[in-house]
Amino acid sequence: MAEPREMEVSNSEGLDAIFRAHYERIARVIGRVIHDQARAEELAVEVFLKWWRNPQAHGEHAEGWLYRTAVREALDELRRQTRRSRFERLFSFVRASPKTPEHLYAVNAEQYKVRSVLGALSRRHAGLLLLWSQGFSYQEIAVSLAVNPDYVGSLVERAQEAFRKEYLKRYGKES
Amino acid sequence: MERNHEAQWVAERLATLEPNWSPNLASGRALLACQLEKRHRSLTWIAVATATAAVCVVLVALPANRALAQQLWYRFILNRVQVVRLDLSKLPLRMQVTTSGLEQHARDMDEAERRAGFRPDLPTPGVLRTNPSITITGPISVEQTIHVRDLESALVKVGASDVQVPAEWEGVQLSTQIGPMVELNYPDRVRILQARPMKLSIASGFPLEHFTEVAFRSIGVSSWEARAMAQQFAGSPSWLVDLPPGAVVNIQEVSLHARPAMLIEEVDDRGAVERATVVRSTSERMYSASSGDRELSMKIADALP
C-alpha cells in the first residue's frame, strides 16, 4: 500500500488522484469475493463515490476507509447473492429447465465453496482473510480494518481457524 | 491442525479466488465519470444547476442605458416548484455565474447556520440514525444578458420563424440570487438539500410573459405550449426544475403536510428506480430529500418541518 497522503478532496482532482492510485487494487479485493468482473468493478467505483461524498473519510485515513468499505461492499454483495440463490432454490421445484453443466461445475468448484464459507463467517474474519490473502501487510490490515496492529497476527489466526472449521463443517474434508 | 499448516491450507483455498481478469482502469474511470454526472443531475433539484433552471424564472430587467437605482422593482419569493421536461441549459442567453465558494464543509449545525444564514432543519429524531456531513453551497448569483441576435439564431434553428424578438431587448440583463444551500449527506446516499426560496426581482415594464414565451420557443417548445407555459409562469412565477427530455424519470405529485410535493424517480437502464427525490417547499424553505428508496425519501421529506 502506498504511504497515506493528505489529499485535496473537495474537488474532482482529488478524487481522480486517489482513484488512479487505488482503483485496481480495490477492484481486485472485491473481485476475490464477486466472481463477475463487471459487477466487481461497478462496486469498486461505488466505493470511491461513497468516499467522495463522505468528507469525514478524507485525509490521512482515506486509504484505510477505502479498503474497509471495499471489503464491506464485497461481503454485502456476496450475502445478497447468497440470499438470492437461496430464494431461487426454494422455487427450484417449479423450474422446468435442468441445471446447465456450467452451473453444476460452478457449484462444485472450489471457488464456490470458498466464497460460501467467507459469506458465512463474521464480517471481521472474512475481511481479515481477504486482505491477508491479497498480500496486505499486518500494518496495512490494521489501518484498513481499524484494528490494533499488535493484535492483527492473532486476529488473522483466529480468522483462519474459523474458516477451516466452517469449511470442514460444510464440505467435510480438507480436499 | 498445526498452525503453519493451517495458514497454508487456508491460503491455498483463498488463492483460488484470485481474479483471472485485470481491472480496467479506463472503463472504471468512465464509469466513475458517468456516476458523477448522474450525481450532478441529481443535484439539479436545488444546487448548482438551479443556475440554469433560474434562467426563465428570474427576470431582472436592467436596460443597459439606465441605472439600477432608477428601476422600479417587483419582487417575488419563489416557493413553488414546477418541473418542465426541457433542457433549459440550451437557452440562448449569455450567463455569468458568481458564487462566494461552491462547496464548503461545516463541522456542525452552528457552523452551517453561520455560513448559510439560516439554521438547517433536520428530520424529526428517529428517521435517520446518524449525523450528516454538512456542505454549504453558494450563495449563487446568476447574471444573464439577452442578445437579440442569439435569440433570433436559436429561433431560426428550431424553425420558429414566426417569432419576432423586440430590438429593445438587446443588452437587457437578467439576474437572480440563489441560496446559500445546505446539503446534508448521510450514509447510503441519503441526501437532504435545503435553501431559502429564491428571490426574483423584475424591473417594471419588462414584458415577462412575452419574454418567457420567446425563451421557451427558442429551445423548441411549440407555439401553443410556450404561450400556455408563459401565461402560467407570469401569473405565478415558480422555480422551474428542468429535466431534459432524454432523462428517464418518473414524476409524480404527492401530498405531504397537506401540501403538494414532487416525487421524481430516476430510473436505470433496466427500469429499476435508482434514486427517488422528493421536492417540497414552505413559505420559508425549499427542501429536497433523496435516497435510493422511494419510501425512505418520502419519509424523510415528511419528517422535515
Image (cartoon, rainbow, N blue to C red):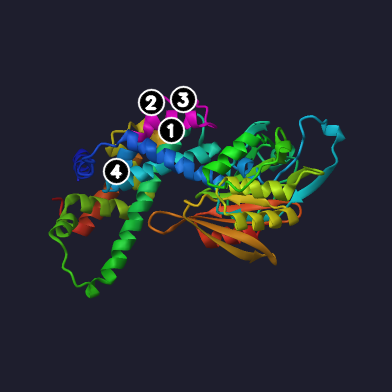
> What distance separates the C-alpha of mark 2 from that of mark 4?
20 Å
Q: Which of marks 4 and 1 precedes in the sequence?
A: 4
Where does label 4 land, which residue?
A31
Mark nearer the N terminus (2 vs 4):
2
Q: Whole-Å distance between the Cαs marked 3 and 4?
A: 25 Å
Chain-order first, disc 2 or disc 1: 2
Q: Which mark is residue A2?
A: 2
Question: As displayed, is residue B171 above or below residue B59?
Answer: above
The reply to whether callout 1 and callout 4 are in contact (CB within 8 Å) is no
Which amino acid type is marked by label 2? Ala
**Which residue is denoted by mark 3 in the rendering?**
A5
Q: In the image, residue B31 lies at what x, y percent? A: 39, 41
Q: Secondary structure at mark 4?
A: helix
Q: Is residue B111 above or below residue B131?
A: above
* Cα distance between the residues tagged 1 and 3: 9 Å
Q: Which chain letter matches label 3?
A: A
Check residue A71 for magenta coloring: no
Badge 2 and badge 1 in a common chain: yes
In this rendering, the answer to whether A119 lies above or below B259 is above
Q: Would residue B226 be found to the left or right of residue A9 on screen?
A: right
Three-letter code for the amino acid on which mark 4 is drawn: Gly
Tag 2: Cα neighbours inside 10 Å, few (<14), some, or many (≥20)?
Answer: few
Tell which subunit mark 2 falls on.
A
At x 15% / y 59%, what residue is drawn?
A: A104
Residue A31: in sight, yes or no? yes
**Badge 3 vs badge 2, beta-carbon distance below 8 Å:** yes
Kindly identify which residue carries mark 1: A63
Residue at 23% across / 39% down in the picture?
B21
